[in-house]
Image: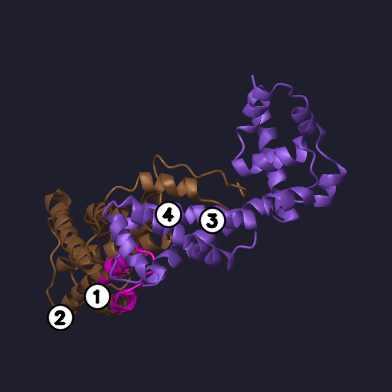
Amino acid sequence: MSDEAAWPALMAAAQGGDPQAYRRLLKEIIPVVRALVRRRVYDPALVEDVIQDVLLAAHRVRHTYDPSCPFLPWIGAITAARSIDALRRHGRARRREINDDSAMQSQPDERAARQIDGIGAGSELDQLLGVLPARQRQVVEMVKLHEMSLEEAAQASHLSVSAIKALLHRALGRLRSQGRTDHEP
Amino acid sequence: MNHDALIEELCRTATPVRRPLPSAARALGAAIVSLALGWLMVGVHPSFANLNGTGNALGGLELAMTAIAGVAALLCAFEMSIAGRPARGLYLATGSFLAWLVVSLAGLSATGTPSGSLGDGLYCFRFLLVAGAPMMVLVVLMLRRTRTLRPGRTLLVAALGVASLSISLLACCHPFALSRVDFLMHTAAVACIVLLMVVPGRRWIGIAPVSGVRRSGVSGAG
């Protein structure tokens, strides 16, 4: 029996509360979900986000799956809907943001950089970076703290340079807004 | 990219679940309970005591068309709420709804006062909303059981089903002949039912975040 043929039975067991079957199923479907997401989404960082959205949505509506039907159309429909939702959200954000890489490099935000440089104590730094998602934090640490180039950071994290730039841009934006919130009276 | 942490969280919270009934059974059950609730609402409401139907064949046809459109639209909404299912019942619902429209337009020509006077249809407007109110609540609650990936579309179809069932109740006690104002008010009531269901209902039947589960830290696009 191929893995794919076992998915309805695994999902039926998962609906009955079997965590082993559920774990096996979720791990096996990730490559398929990733391939389906990549048909619509080209940003590698966004692809991984959408995969997590798909897993969460499938978990939320797992009771609606009928084990007498094939599994792929069910997970495929969830994946398609979540990919489109992510692209819409991403598109809205991009319409509001200007992502000018050359301007970013020629005119670095010294205030944000000073904020990072000025923090001496490790605990304060941890606290500050703690507001970031793990991936953004990793990129900030590589580029700003370990002074790696964008290319080196991209190589180390298996992402493209543009994905690293986007992550860094979002991380600095979040740190800036967090700083403003912290210093408000 | 490793999603193991999230998978572990999901497995930890994966309690046994109960599958919903087949969509056809749910649609039929929803229609029967909806009609009963709607009838009860207009029955206990003192202002709806003096509607009398003429009982002619076209009136009966109108009732049948709207009842079929209502059940088919509910079946379609319940099917649409489940990922990967085709929109079964959509053609039947659309066809029956259009047939109702044609029969209503025939009713327009059967009246002695084609235009009607202002305020003619207020009575029917209130009737449709009062009968439709419990149906709206019931159908939204039933859709909340399965949730849906496309709340707007699903609710739109479900709302047309509720409106059709309300009209079928009205057809039981409404003269077949319609004035234009009356027909306009019927249409306005359908639009109100759609708005009242779709706008607040979207938040209720969308796929909400799983309580107690946090995404693991890959949120690069956030």
Q: Which residue type does callout 4 highlight?
A: Ala
**Residue B57 has which mark?**
2
Q: Residue B14 vs residue B216: left or right?
A: left
Q: Are marks 4 and 1 on the same chain?
A: no
Residue A65 appears in view: no
The residue tagged 3 is: A50
Q: Earlier in the sequence, mark 1 or mark 2?
A: 2
Q: CA distance from mark 4 to mark 2?
A: 49 Å
Magenta stretch, residue numbers: B72-99
Helix or strand or loop: what does disc 4 sit on? helix
Which residue is more in the foreground, B171 or A88?
A88
Chain letter behind tag 1: B
Q: CA distance from mark 4 to mark 1?
A: 57 Å
Residue A84: x percent and y percent? 54, 62
Disc 4 residue crowd, few under 14, some 14–19, many 20+, Cα 10 Å: many
Q: Residue B2 vs residue B36: left or right?
A: right
Residue B92 appears in view: yes
Helix or strand or loop: what does disc 2 sit on? helix
Q: Are marks 4 and 2 in contact (CB under 8 Å)?
A: no
Residue B68: x percent and y percent? 23, 73
Q: Earlier in the sequence, mark 4 or mark 3?
A: 3
Q: CA distance from mark 3 to mark 2?
A: 55 Å
In the displayed orientation, state which residue is furthest to the right. Answer: A106
Chain letter behind tag 4: A
Which residue is more in the foreground, B135 or A116?
A116
The residue tagged 1 is: B112
Q: Colour of chain A?
A: purple
The residue tagged 4 is: A57
Q: Are marks 1 and 2 in contact (CB under 8 Å)?
A: no
Q: Are marks 3 and 2 in contact (CB under 8 Å)?
A: no
State the residue at coordinates (71%, 38%): A141
